């Protein structure tokens, strides 16, 4: 079974609108972390936001917020007031904490976001 | 700029050859992770080092090996290269332990011809 599912291969959004990128995850761990990364066409992976499974409040970083719904096992990324520079691939990732010392990230397949002027 | 450096940025080599990819983590970070990004496999974890010791292995081929040196930089060695090894190889670093973000380097794009 996929541990991280991103069901939107591609999205087109008008500039200045808000956009939600979906991510659902599958784990039996009680302790885990959820991450979002942005990969522009240049190829680098840019860390955007992190949510721990025990964090009671949704994480926010500037225009990025993570809509964390633990019971539904979803961790959607919300980008407010989208800009042309937001056009990129976006990856959701999870770190499961049951494996002592193994801090690997498991990634979804990504969503390609295109902002339309 | 994440503070993680990787060299070289691009590498073109022939099948059967051996290459070494280098990574310097952010200042203060003890953990280094290697990931491979390919079109067919997506982003996959290869190996994790913490303060010079191997912590975990993922889907890393036996032809691949890595190490982390006392100054905390890391090298990923790829040998007997095949066409399918062509990919973007990322190094990431973190303080280490749960709850810490992993910051990625710019990647090394390996092309095997």
Image (cartoon, rainbow, N blue to C red):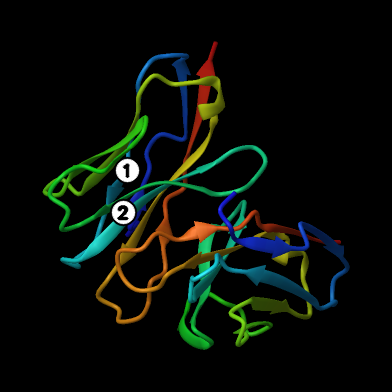
Give the foreground label among 1 and 2.
2
Instruction: Please indicate whether residue A22 sits to the left or right of residue B51 in the image.
Output: left
Q: Residue furthest front?
A: B27
Q: CA distance from mark 1 to mark 2?
A: 10 Å
Pick the residue in front: A50 or A75: A50
Dot 2 crowding, Cα within 10 Å, few <14, some 14–19, many 20+: many
Whole-percent x and y of residue B65? 64, 83
Whole-percent x and y of residue B2? 56, 53
Q: Is residue A66 above or below residue A63?
A: below
Q: Is residue A45 above or below residue A101?
A: above
Residue drawn at the location 84% of the way across and 77% of the way down: B16
Q: Does dot 2 land on a helix, a strand or a loop?
A: strand
Q: Chain of mark 1?
A: A
**Marks 1 and 2 in Cβ contact (< 8 Å):** yes
Instruction: Please indicate whether residue A23 sits to the left or right of residue A105 in the image.
Output: left
Quarter of the image that includes the C terminus of chain B: bottom right
Mark number displayed over residue A23: 1
Residue drawn at the location 62% of the way across and 85% of the way down: B69
- Count the labels in the image: 2
Mark number displayed over residue A34: 2
Pick the residue in front: A111 or A66: A66
**Would you identify the image quadrant in which residue B108 lies?**
bottom right
Residue drawn at the location 33% of the way across and 58% of the way down: A3
């Amino acid at each position: 079974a996929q541990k991280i599912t991103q069901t939107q291969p591609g999205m087109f959004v008008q500039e200045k609108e808000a956009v939600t990128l979906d991510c659902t995850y599958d784990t039996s761990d009680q302790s885990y972390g959820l991450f979002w990364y942005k990969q522009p066409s240049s190829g680098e992976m840019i860390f955007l936001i992190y949510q721990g499974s025990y964090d009671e409040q949704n994480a926010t970083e500037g225009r990025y917020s993570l809509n964390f719904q633990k019971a539904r096992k979803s961790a959607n990324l919300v980008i407010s007031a989208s800009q042309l520079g937001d056009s990129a691939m976006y990856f959701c990732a999870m770190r499961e904490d049951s494996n002592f010392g193994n801090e690997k990230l498991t990634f979804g397949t990504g969503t390609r976001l295109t902002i339309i002027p | 700029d994440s503070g993680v450096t990787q060299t070289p940025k691009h590498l073109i080599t022939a099948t059967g050859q051996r290459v070494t990819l280098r990574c310097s983590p952010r200042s203060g970070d003890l953990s280094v992770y290697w990931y491979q990004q390919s079109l067919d496999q997506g982003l996959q974890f290869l190996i994790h080092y913490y303060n010079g010791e191997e912590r975990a292995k993922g889907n890393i081929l036996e032809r691949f090996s890595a190490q982390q040196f006392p100054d905390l930089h890391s090298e990923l060695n790829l040998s007997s290269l095949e066409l399918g090894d062509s990919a973007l190889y990322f190094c990431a670093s973190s303080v280490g332990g749960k709850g810490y973000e992993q910051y990625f380097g710019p990647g090394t794009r390996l092309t095997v011809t």
